[in-house]
Amino acid sequence: MHSYIQPLAQAYAQNANPENAHWMKKYMKEKFPFFGIKTPDRTIINRAFFARYGLPEFRELEAIVDELMQQPQREFHYFAISLVGKVKKQWTPDNWKLFEKMILTHSWWDTVDSLAGGTMGHYFRRYPALTEPVTAPWNRSDNLWLIRSSILFQLNYKRDTDQELLFKYIRPHLGSKEFFIQKAIGWALRQYARTNAEAVIQFVNSHELAPLSRREALKHLKG
């Protein structure tokens, strides 16, 4: 294990809670083991870790993140996402490859949504010229998590949302039977409706959406 990760692993192990771990694993459909450290406690542990050990050399970031993402316990994956966010001022144009690898490693909605709406959202604001070259292949892929990410990366853009691109990425997947795609479509439209309700209503009324997507899109526009 990388020397930077060792003290973190020790701190997590010392604060493990088997009962919490059982219920956290159950909540995640038995997909990942947990130490059982709830978010407030994990935040305290992480804060103490960064205070003592600081941030790694940027040239070591990919190796450290790769190793964190390969660990079985989910808390390590959350830490990896936090870590890449803390060094965002040092991000380079090539870092999308690392972030994509993170999306594809132990994929589930919790990490993917943090990476799509958070990490990738910030990344494409910094490197807008790379937005379509990176996200268009995601949208055309067979991987549901890449598709979901292509739809959700503008989640927090508000008035900066590229409406044309958002709708363009949604249209090919309107017929998807996949829950996580239907949910992403509805969520993205619901968020954009906070900025441009008229455009969302017009889109929903002029396209055949899955009931779940329609419900989510219009949730805050009723009454």
Image: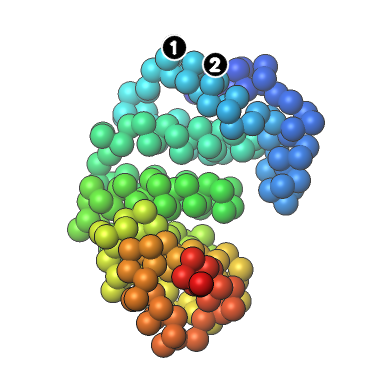
Disc 1 element: helix
Look at the numbered discs 2 and 1 and tell me whether their residues touch, using CB distance below 8 Å: yes
First in sequence, mark 2 or 1: give its number: 2
Q: Residue at x 33, y 23 (%)?
A: 57
Vertical position of residue 212 compared to residue 187: above or below:
below
Q: Position of residue 160 (x, y in %)?
A: 25, 59
What is the CA distance from the residue labelled 2 to the residue labelled 1? Answer: 10 Å
Q: Which residue is mark 2?
A: 7
Q: Residue at x 22, y 56 (%)?
A: 128
Q: At label 1, which amino acid type do we have?
A: Arg
Q: Position of residue 81 (x, y in %)?
A: 46, 38
* Crowd class of label 1 (few under 14; some 14 to 19; many from 20; radius 10 Å): few
Q: Residue at x 28, y 53 (%)?
A: 124
Name the colouring of the figure: rainbow
Disc 2 element: helix
Q: Which residue is mark 1?
A: 52
Q: Name the image quarter holding the N terminus.
A: top right
In this rendering, position of residue 156 left or right of residue 13:
left
Q: At label 2, which amino acid type do we have?
A: Pro
Q: Nearer the viewer, residue 189 or 49?
A: 189
Q: Position of residue 26 (x, y in %)?
A: 76, 46
Q: Is residue 155 visible?
A: yes
Judged by depth in the image, the label closer to the viewer, 2 or 1, is 1
Displayed quadrant of residue 167: bottom left
Displayed quadrant of residue 64: top left
Vertical position of residue 58 compared to residue 210: above or below:
above
Q: Nearer the viewer, residue 60 or 185?
A: 185
Q: Position of residue 218 (x, y in %)?
A: 49, 72
Vertical position of residue 54 compared to residue 92: above or below:
above
Q: Is residue 142 visible?
A: no
